[in-house]
Amino acid sequence: MQDKVIEELIKAETKRQREGLEMIPSENHTSPDVLKALGSRLTDKYSEGYPGKRYYGGCEVVDKVENLARDRAKKLFGVSHANVQPYSGSPANQAIYFALVDPGDTVMGMHLYYGGHMTHGLKVNFSGTLYNSVQYHTGKDGYLDYEEMADMATREKPKLIFVGATAYPRIFDWKKLREIADLCNAWLIADVSHISGLIVAGAHPSPVGYAHVIMTTTHKTLRGPRGAMILCDGNPSNPLKAVERTPENLPTLIDRAIIPGLQGGPHNHQTAAIAIALREASLPSFKTYGKQIVKNAKKLADELTKRDFELVTGGTDNHLLLVDLTNKKVIGAEAEVALGKAGITMNKNTVPFDPRPPFSPSGIRMGTPALTTRGMKEAQMVQIAEWIDQVIEHRNDDKFLEKIHRDVKKLCKQYPLPGEAKAK
Ligand code: DSN
């Protein structure tokens, strides 16, 4: 690389990942093939439009790439339509609003501080300013409060309901959620960004058949490049005709919302990498991987509970744990910093009904997708729980944290990043 400054920074980040435990539940380690596609000449090409209907010449190759990604997505998730062009999750959600509701319409989503996402109607986000957003919460027990949701849907009559989370450790009951959406004839949108890899692996129920539209990012448990996909059923219509907002027309509504509605040229290198990740996710080994993510999370939850950590909902059904650190007399930010010094990366997070402000919350969020990609299993979770406990206890002792980091590095050597050899 000619740019030595950036080259060194890439090396430094690779080293940081190689020698540390990446436990942010929305992160993962991609395969060498995914990385290769991201660094390919496909990034040079403009191709606004869709395969076969582009505004540029020279699209014969990228058409094949995008068709392959779309076909693999449809097959893997069992839907009839896939748009693989969203640049990432937030723009994808923006497109869904743009496709299905008008500014000023009432929309409903889970509050960020209770585990939702900014784009699900947070008042400072476009979704809470352009639309009249009403926000549901979890109950005191940390579980989704389906009764509150049903009451809110009946009372507020939203036109669209977003379901999905960034910090929710339990299963979504899609049937019940569709019944709630049907109470007010709302579109049910499943944002499965965090759990799509688990869905593919059969480790979490699929929203297909319940949600009208499904959105997932491609870089979390699905283990692909940064990006997103919007999935639905329906019939693509003549693109020149005006279409009504009916379930039948969802493919056209979504495709038009992406382009010309919101985006310009698709990122073809990203599309190719998504296609690769989708092939990898269709292999039997991915089913084993997804199930092991959950086994690891459950083991970590058990081990932390034994060490007197308080888990929101008391445990987990998926890839993540949300820990309320109040009883440990440490706040999330302090824990994040101390764990970081020990080579264990996770993030501070609000817990339901958090008395503390969101920039300095009471909790910490951790997950197992990246550790599981490296091949770690239950035995390593026991060790990691012990390290987390020790780090929290000795959080102000930098020498102690350095020692833990040395131990973490030793473990990491045994579990290389994808495509790397085990270090001696
Ligand atoms: N930033 C993602 C997460 O960490 O969950 C959500 O977009």
Image (spheres, rainbow, N blue to C red):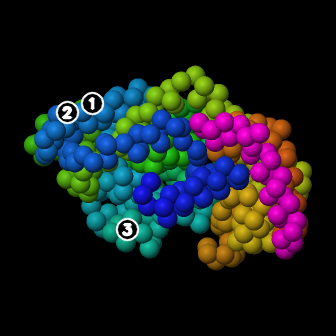
Crowding at dot 3, Cα within 10 Å, few <14 / some 14-19 / many 20+, comes out as some
- Of the image marks 3 and 2, the number of the one nearer the N terminus: 2
Can see residue 47? yes
In reply to whether residue 411 is colored magenta, the answer given is yes
Q: Which residue is mark 1?
A: 64
Measured Cα–Cα span from mark 3 to mark 1: 34 Å
Separation of marks 3 and 2 at Cα, in angstroms: 36 Å
CA distance separating discs 2 and 1:
7 Å
407, 158: nearer the viewer: 407
Name the residue rendered at 64%, 32% in the picture: 289
Residue ID at (52%, 31%): 281
Percent across and percent down for residue 9 are 54, 61
In the image, is the residue at mark 1 within 8 Å of ligand 1 by its beta carbon?
Answer: no
| Marking on residue 126 | 3
Residue kind at label 1, given as amino acid type: Lys
Give, as a three-letter code, the residue at label 3: Phe
Residue drawn at x 79%, y 52% is 408
**Which residue is found at the position 19% from the left and 53% from the top?**
260
Write down the quadrant of residue 74 in the picture: top left
The picture places residue 224, in percent across and down from the top left corner, at 49, 41
Disc 2 marks which residue?
60
Give the amino acid at mark 2: Glu
Span shown in magenta: 396-424
Q: Quarter-wise, where is residue 2 in the image?
A: bottom left
Disc 1 residue crowd, few under 14, some 14–19, many 20+, Cα 10 Å: some
